[in-house]
Amino acid sequence: MKFLGIFSFIAVILMGLILIQVMNFENEFETYLERSVPFIGTDVPRFEGIDGSGIKIAVIDTGVDYNHPDLFGWGPDGKVVGGYNFIQEGQPPMDNNGHGTQVAGVAAADGQAVGVAPKAKILAYKVSEDGEGVASDLIIRAIEKAIEDEADIINISLGVNKTNTKIERAVNQALEKEIFVVTAAGNDGPSLESIGSPGRNFGSVTVGATYNNLTSSLVATLEIDNKPYTVIPMVGNENTEYAITGKLVFGGYGKEDELKDLDVKDSILVVERGSDVPGELLYFSIKESNAADAGAKAMIVYNNVPGIFLGELIHEFIEPDYSPRIPVVSMDREEGLEIVESIDGQHATLNLFFNPDYLAHFSSRGPVSPFYIKPEIVAPGAYINTTQSNAGYNFTSGTSYAAPHVSGAAALLLQKNPDLHHHEIKSLLLTTVEPVTDAYGNEFSINEAGGGRLNIAKAFDAKLIIEPPNFVGLASSVDKVVEKQLQLKSLDGQLSGIDVAFDGPEFMKFSSQLDENILNIRISLLEENFGEHEGKIWITHKEIQYVVPFIFHYTPGSVSVIQQNNKLLFDIYHPEEWSFAKISITNSKDGIVETTTATPNKNSFIEIYENAEYWIDAKIRVNGNTSSAFNTIDVRTLEERERLDIDIPEKQMGIIVVSVVIIGIVGIILKRR
């Protein structure tokens, strides 16, 4: 989960630097923790002296450079009070890559860069040398060691791009020990269903990434033939009132003599950074003036070396009366060359607009399950300048850096109220978020951005704990009513003055009733609008508004389930004639999945071995198509018994099964001789 994800969506990059001084020629710049950390509201707890003191945050990563002045010291008297090196056992967990140092800095740097919880201590667990290759067994061992070392919070900004039940179990063990676990969603967006373990874990808080900075943040989007590209607005740009559309024209390096013989009028000009003449200083302001003089509507400058960059139209060498006339954005070299090589009269659309709460294109999306929501929250993760190895600072992006914003926030809440349970911290953080919107003011979906962006100030002032802080509703043509109980707890003991509002599809009829500390929710479906729907329940308590997002699955078919001793028995219904169903159940405790099949003439069941909530997912074959149905059952009356759980890889298991079959056949033949 390191650095920018490569897959593009709405090509957006925040570079809101209009009100600050940025890099000079020595590449010195203001640390962006000074932008993202205040933006999420840390000033409020700091006014009350809350800074993370007494809290230990375990960073499971590439180690931490404890020689960095902002993270200084190894051992009981240092910032990094402990940890373990799983790569080179016996050695301290020194970071040779930088990723873990960056993550730790966001959470708890205390120096030139100031993290979210600057007085919190770090436990450093080195499970990767390069931040790319990560062995799942080392993540598991690190979680177990963090439990042993009595961490208060675990931050995992590394993972695997698939489900790993062993990692899920390890995370659950930490949760059972009252450790708050934060995981990065990953950088495989904008594709849906792109979150792997441990970000898939039901109990942890999974964090996606938004952009950075304050309300001056300028974001750009570029789309060519319905394909999005990543671009960054140059310093000195203003927002555009309308989308800019024009044909693409390649203009070399953007020199005046290169443009004079081109038809540049009303185009979006694409040029390369720098010059083909050694030593020539072809500033971006000169390129912009040449493009505007030639009649271009906008200009894209792609890098002359690998990677993306931040450009400045306004700098100390501009002409005294210079002012940019057209929008200019910068682009990665690889994507720029891709555009240049394929230019053939295509038109592009460019937008520049203010919005720090914009979902980063690389941020991995859900869903991971029909039964719960991931990611649950987003936080700044684009262009964060944080601590880097060798006493440096690094300008970097990824959900890896969004996650420690949430870990630091949890440290502040835990210092303020040490008696909070991990699920109560989760509630305070998830129900006090800010909305995350696109270029047109539309909120991103729950599967993309969870409930919204972290707001520490609001969470810090919050007095109401709501559990669950989000939920999934399941309805079918057989059962069109969903009832949900939200348990409320006031931190000051007063639940009076609760106000509830509903924001959801018009075909849903909503009602609620408060019974002591239980808010009973009832949602009735008024028409057959099958599919996935989402909405929000707003709860106001003492002038603070809390949000409980929900996703609704409304299916034509249904799967009913009853428990009979240690068996779950299933019954499939569909309004049309069905021929076959595959039924999967997931144990919510450890993520283990069992499957069976059903036909109209065959009863089906699955044996269970422990008390847990089980999630049932039925894929029903109807007229050559597949239709889904969902249900859950909470088993609490089972007399638990030992289950044979031998961890044998699938390939080896197949060999064993084939061997058993062969032995059986040989035995039969010998018997008949």
Image: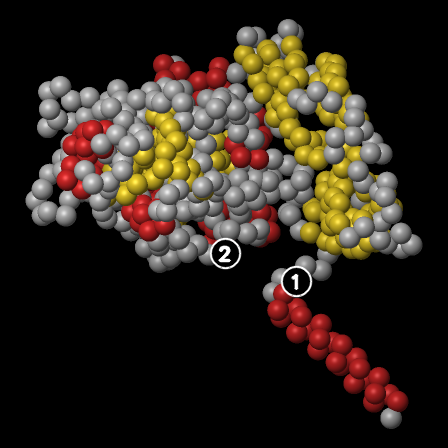
Locate residue 451 relative to residue 81 in the image: left or right: right
Name the residue rendered at 75%, 45% in the picture: 627
506 w.r.t. 646: above or below: above
110 w.r.t. 89: above or below: above
Q: From the image, tell me which residue sits under label 1.
A: 646
- Residue 20: percent from left, percent from top: 24, 22
Q: In which quarter of the image is residue 50?
A: top left
Viewer-closest of 47 and 249:
249
The label on residue 188 is none
Q: From the image, tell me which residue sits under label 2.
A: 137
Viewer-closest of 43 and 350:
350
| Image colouring | secondary structure
The single residue placed furthest to the top in the displayed view is 497
Total numbered labels placed on residues in the image:
2
| The C terminus, quarter of image | bottom right
Viewer-closest of 394 and 389:
394
Going by the numbered disc 1, the residue's amino acid type is: Ile
Judged from the image, the secondary structure of the residue bearing numbered disc 2 is helix
The single residue placed furthest to the right in the displayed view is 601
Going by the numbered disc 2, the residue's amino acid type is: Asp
Locate residue 583 relative to residue 391 in the image: left or right: right
Of marks 2 and 1, which one's residue comes earlier in the chain? Answer: 2
- Residue 435: percent from left, percent from top: 50, 23
Name the residue rendered at 40%, 33% in the picture: 349
Judged from the image, the secondary structure of the residue bearing numbered disc 1 is loop
Residue 448 visible in the snapshot: yes
- Residue 410: percent from left, percent from top: 47, 28
295 w.r.t. 271: above or below: above
Q: Do the residues labelled 2 and 1 touch (CB within 8 Å)?
A: no
Locate residue 10 relative to residue 271 in the image: left or right: right
Name the residue rendered at 45%, 26% in the picture: 439
Mark pair 2, 1: CA separation: 16 Å
